[in-house]
Image (tube, grey):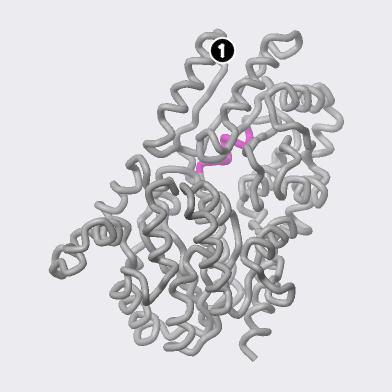
Amino acid sequence: MKIVNIVPGFGGTFYCGNCLRDSGFANALRKAGHDAMILPVYLPLTINGDIHDTPVFYGAVNIYLKQVFPLLRHMPLWMEHMLNSSPLLKLAASKAGSTRAQGLEELTESMLMGKEGKQGKELDELVHFLKHDVKPDVVHFSNALLLGMARQIREEIGVPVVCSLQDEDVWVDAMNEPYPEKIWGLLAKKASDVDAFVAVSHYFAGVMKKKMQLPDLKVHVVHIGVDPAEYAYYPDPPDPPAIGYLSRIYEENGFGILVDAFILLKSGPGFENLRLNATGGMTGDDKPFFQQQMKKLQKAGLAKDFILQEDFRPENLGSFFKSVSVMSVPVLKGEAFGLYQLEALASGVPLVQPALGAFPEIIRETDAGLLYEPNNAVALAGCLASLLNDRDRLIRFRANGRKAVEEKFECSSLTGKMIEVYKKISR
């Protein structure tokens, strides 16, 4: 079976769990004997530091300029090629605002309108490439914000269309009014152009059924998976102890809550040697927030106990996981899943997460961590302290996490479930 995964690239400036998920899924499909291709839109898909040589459709700079300046919709071909060049797109990804919903409301709406939007030329180019150069059996969208392409692909190529569901609400609900309601309405309308939706958790399936008015029979749940063979397992916690954070370093992912919890822990007895290790990168938008957190640590005299690992490429995360006792990414409003959780568990690192989003589902399935509420520094500090002070439970959670990844979240078995979805809608 030939499967094309259409995914938004991210330019490589921060840890993108969705992008790693898409890349890992394509690799698992290939290992299972299928012909899988990743087709990036907006920005290059940079995994392991390399820019893939697959052409980038809907180049971010190109479509943004055309949206804002109507005269540029008729720019010469040489100018379009220049704006779509990988170096320029990667530069754009590093700039402030490239991953911010505010200011991109009209562009998001136009993209969802498909042929009726202002990116009709780009849609025609994508469909032509798929129809004449690739000839897929299934087209799989990484998220629902790409659904403006679905109808034309389905009608002109005549293949089933699948769409993953993960964290679309983070983008849409952050928009300025009145766009959230408008975009959710468009997404509900575009759902009829899709043969099957695949949510990454039962929690998020429920969220999107409500927001997009999706019928139960059209929504499947397939958890994210990883290959445990790619992760070294560390059964014993490190000495000195350390709290780990792996994700994009910005406010919405709760890095500030974790810093405050760390300061609280260090102010009490028993945690004199405790460290905070963080990695995951950031965008230009995130740097002022990060500097604020560094000032808090400096004021508390704890800057020396904080380690920032700037290289967050997958092949270099082993040293990070080896160095941490427990990991926490206290996302303010929860998350649809969070790939970083599986990466930590596969390495033997237990979790401490807020009782929000899909986190309770993952903790329940793995028995490899603790939940706390409310999502504030005091509650997080208390939960971290209870686990760090209980070595037997810490070691048990480390073993449970690795076992759960091997038995429940192993990528090849979960890829098999996705193939069953493809076969069902291809009959």
Residue denoted by label 1: 302
Q: Nearer the viewer, residue 180 or 178?
A: 178
Going by the numbered disc 1, the residue's amino acid type is Leu
Specify the farthest residue to the front.
178
- Residue 329 vertical position relative to residue 426 in the rendered view, above or below: above
Residue 137 vertical position relative to residue 51 in the rendered view, above or below? below
Q: Quadrant of residue 387?
A: top right
Task: Examine the rendered structure and indicate whether residue 334 appears above or below residue 303.
Answer: below
Q: Secondary structure at mark 1?
A: loop
Instruction: Say whether residue 158 is left or right of residue 412.
Output: left
Residue 229 in view in this figure: yes
Residue 309 percent across, percent down from the top left: 49, 31
First to last magenta residue range: 316-322
Where residue 325 sits, quadrant-wise, is top right
Against 214, is 62 above or below? above
By secondary structure, the bulk of the magenta-drawn segment is best described as helix
User: Residue visible at 75% across and 37% down?
Assistant: 235
Horizontal and vertical percent for residue 298? 50, 12
In the current view of this chain or complex, which residue is farthest to the right?
392
Q: Position of residue 206 (x, y in %)?
A: 72, 60
Q: Nearer the viewer, residue 173 or 152?
A: 173
- Side of 358 relative to 104 (left or right): right
- The answer to whether residue 232 is seen in the rendering is no
Q: Nearer the viewer, residue 127 or 108?
A: 108
Give the total of numbered labels.
Answer: 1
Going 70% across and 74% down the picture, which residue do you hit? 215
Callout 1 crowding tier (Cα within 10 Å): few <14, some 14–19, many ≥20? some
